[in-house]
Image (spheres, rainbow, N blue to C red):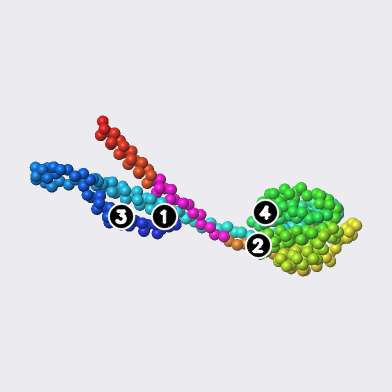
């Protein structure tokens, strides 16, 4: 449909009538040249002549000026075409996944779909890759932790970029230790910079906290204060946990303090099932945003007025040249 941004501009249509009533209009009717023998001419022709300094515009000229005036008013009123409503679903949830890259993640106690033994990190890559593909429309971020925690991917909807960054992960690239508390603290900081109401953090680890500056439970309290739900995933067989056994009690307490849930993944199938359960517990919240595209049309009446004016000027120029010949 069509709409004018400033329809009140059409009130200026009375402007020519107002100008027509100004004293200058009457002044323009006075003779600009006084002829001394005017009376003799009138007597000879038996008619009273009228001498004026300004020639009157023809009906054609008046009509053209009105058309130009209306076109300029139309341009000033800023016409626009408003298209059909376009709806877009915007997710109200942001998801952060925090992955442990300590040395024990190289333990091969998981199997892929073909039954081949793979290490824990490889299992995480496979499951997270599938998880990311199902998160269309959501903003997802990726945190890695070892000796310290760092952001591998800020919140993004570019799933291809996430999968690429995920494929580059390797055991030990963040150091041999396990800084679970620092990873939670970093996640809270990232969520503070967003304006969504549904904030979910998934922490995946196969050991206990050995290198955090911020204790895990202290970080969990901070997360609860900022409405961040933490879902903790303990991975692997605790008998094969290595030098630092899996601290399931701390992971459980973290999830309970923040309104999340604790999961234990012994193999790839259980790990994949965990993400399905998380999806059911925390379904995606979307907000529908409707937008009607607007296209400005003011240039069309303006260009038409310009073409008419240039065309008429060209006609007058040609006529004057012919009269001079």
Give the residue at the far top of this rendering: 325
Question: Nearer the N terminus, badge 4 or badge 1?
Answer: 1
Disc 3: CA contacts within 10 A as few (<14), some (14-19) or many (>=20): few
Instruction: Nearest to the eye among marks 1 and 3: give it.
Output: 3
For the residue pair 62 and 289, the one nearer the viewer reads as: 62
Dot 2 surroundings within 10 Å: few (below 14), some, or many (20 or more)?
few
Which residues make up the magenta segment?
Answer: 289-304
In space, the residues marked 3 and 2 are separated at their CA atoms by 59 Å
Q: Is residue 237 magenta?
A: no
SS at mark 2? loop
Q: Residue at x 37, y 43 (%)?
A: 307
The span from disc 2 to disc 1 (Cα, nearest Å) is 39 Å
Pointer 4 local density, CA inside 10 Å: few below 14, some 14–19, many at least 20: some
Q: Which residue is mark 4?
A: 156
Which image quadrant: the N terminus?
A: bottom left
The spot of residue 221 in percent (x, y) is 77, 67
Disc 1 target residue: 77
- Image quarter hosting the C terminus: top left
For label 1, the crowd category at 10 Å Cα-Cα, with few meaning under 14, some 14 to 19 and many 20 or more, is some
SS class of the residue under badge 4?
strand
Q: In front: mark 2 or mark 1?
A: 1
**Dot 3 corresponds to which residue?**
19
Mark 4 and mark 1: span between their CA atoms? 41 Å
């Amino acid at each position: 449909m069509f709409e004018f941004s400033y329809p009140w501009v059409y009130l200026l249509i009375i402007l020519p009538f107002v100008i027509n009533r100004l004293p200058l209009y009457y002044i323009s009717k006075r003779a600009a040249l006084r002829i001394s023998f005017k009376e003799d001419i009138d007597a000879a022709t038996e008619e009273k002549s009228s001498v004026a300094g300004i020639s009157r515009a023809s009906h054609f000229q008046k009509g053209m000026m009105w058309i130009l005036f209306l076109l300029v008013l139309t341009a000033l009123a800023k016409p626009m075409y408003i298209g059909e409503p376009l709806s877009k679903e915007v997710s109200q949830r942001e998801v952060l996944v925090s992955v442990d890259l300590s040395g024990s993640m190289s333990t091969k106690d998981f199997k892929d779909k073909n039954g081949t033994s793979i290490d824990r990190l490889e299992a995480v890559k496979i499951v997270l890759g599938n998880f990311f593909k199902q998160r269309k429309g959501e903003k997802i971020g990726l945190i890695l932790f070892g000796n310290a925690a760092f952001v591998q991917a800020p919140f993004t909807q570019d799933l291809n970029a996430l999968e690429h960054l995920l494929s580059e992960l390797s055991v030990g690239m963040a150091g041999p230790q396990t800084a679970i508390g620092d990873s939670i603290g970093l996640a809270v900081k990232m969520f503070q910079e967003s304006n969504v109401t549904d904030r979910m953090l998934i922490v995946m680890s196969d050991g206990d906290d050995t290198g955090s500056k911020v204790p895990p439970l202290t970080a969990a309290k901070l997360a609860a204060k900022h409405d961040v739900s933490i879902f903790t995933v303990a991975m692997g067989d605790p008998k094969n946990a290595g030098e630092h056994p899996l601290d399931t009690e701390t992971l459980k307490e973290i999830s309970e303090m923040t309104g999340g849930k604790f999961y234990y993944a012994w193999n790839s199938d259980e790990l994949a099932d965990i993400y399905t359960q998380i999806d059911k517990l925390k379904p995606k919240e979307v907000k529908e945003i409707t937008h009607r595209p607007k296209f400005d049309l003011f240039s069309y009446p303006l260009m038409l007025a310009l073409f008419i004016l240039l065309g008429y000027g060209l006609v007058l120029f040609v006529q004057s040249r012919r009269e001079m010949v």
